[in-house]
Amino acid sequence: MADDSETSPSFLTSLPSQPITDDIVKQIGESDTSKIRGAMGFPGSTPSEIEAFLLEMEARTYVIVFNRSAEQWQVYKSFEMEGMSHQEIVDHASELANEWLAQSLSDRIAAAEKTEPDT
């Protein structure tokens, strides 16, 4: 398991510089790109916003996360899936997404407070 930002899926730069919806994750997973096998969003800190999602490709699964301070999507971690069942892949990716959500909580709160209008 490694941080594979140098081998990031090329479409990351085409994602908006904000969290996305589950519909966008679904479109990614159902794309005609032969290398993509599927995608699944993980619930984030804000209802209806996806801040982390699983991207299953030919040989690796990526946990893609939204870095609020950099306002961009990036690979958090990836792993080879050889010998893993679909459920094992989902479970492992969920653990990684939860790890990132816990580690990034204070950054995400600070970023959300910066974007809230003063009342």
Image: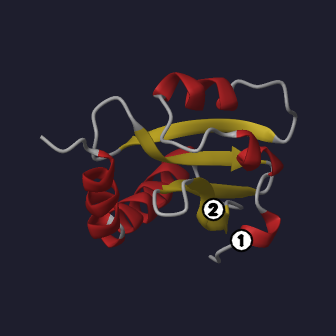
**In the orientation shown, which residue stands out farthest toward the front?**
119
Q: Quadrant of the N terminus?
A: bottom right
Dot placed on the residue nearer the N-terminal end, 1 or 2: 1
Say whether residue 17 is left or right of residue 49. Answer: right
**In the orientation shown, which residue stands out farthest toward the bottom?**
2
Q: Mark 1: which secondary structure?
A: loop
Spatial distance from mark 1 to mark 2, Cα to Cα? Answer: 7 Å
**What is the image's colouring?**
secondary structure
Give percent across and percent down for residue 72. 59, 54
Q: Quadrant of residue 70?
A: bottom right
The residue depicted at 66 percent of the width and 55 percent of the height is: 61
Give percent across and percent down for residue 64. 58, 54
- What type is the residue that disc 1 sits on? Asp
Between residues 101 and 14, which one lies in front from this camera angle? 14
The residue depicted at 53 percent of the width and 37 percent of the height is: 40
Q: Residues within 10 Å of mark 2 (few under 14, many from 20)?
A: many
Q: Quadrant of residue 11?
A: top right
Please say if the residues under marks 1 and 2 sit with CB atoms less than 8 Å apart: yes
Between residues 116 and 23, which one lies in front from this camera angle? 116
Q: Residues within 10 Å of mark 1 (few under 14, many from 20)?
A: some
Mark 2 lies on residue:
75
Say whether residue 31 is left or right of residue 40. Answer: right
Numbered badge on residue 66: none
Say whether residue 58 is left or right of residue 96. Answer: right
The residue depicted at 26 percent of the width and 44 percent of the height is: 116
Q: Mark 2: which secondary structure?
A: strand
Q: Number of marks in the image?
A: 2
Mark 1 lies on residue:
4
Between residues 116 and 90, which one lies in front from this camera angle? 116
Give percent across and percent down for residue 93. 50, 57
Up/down of 96 relative to 25, above or below: below
Say whether residue 118 is left or right of residue 42. Answer: left
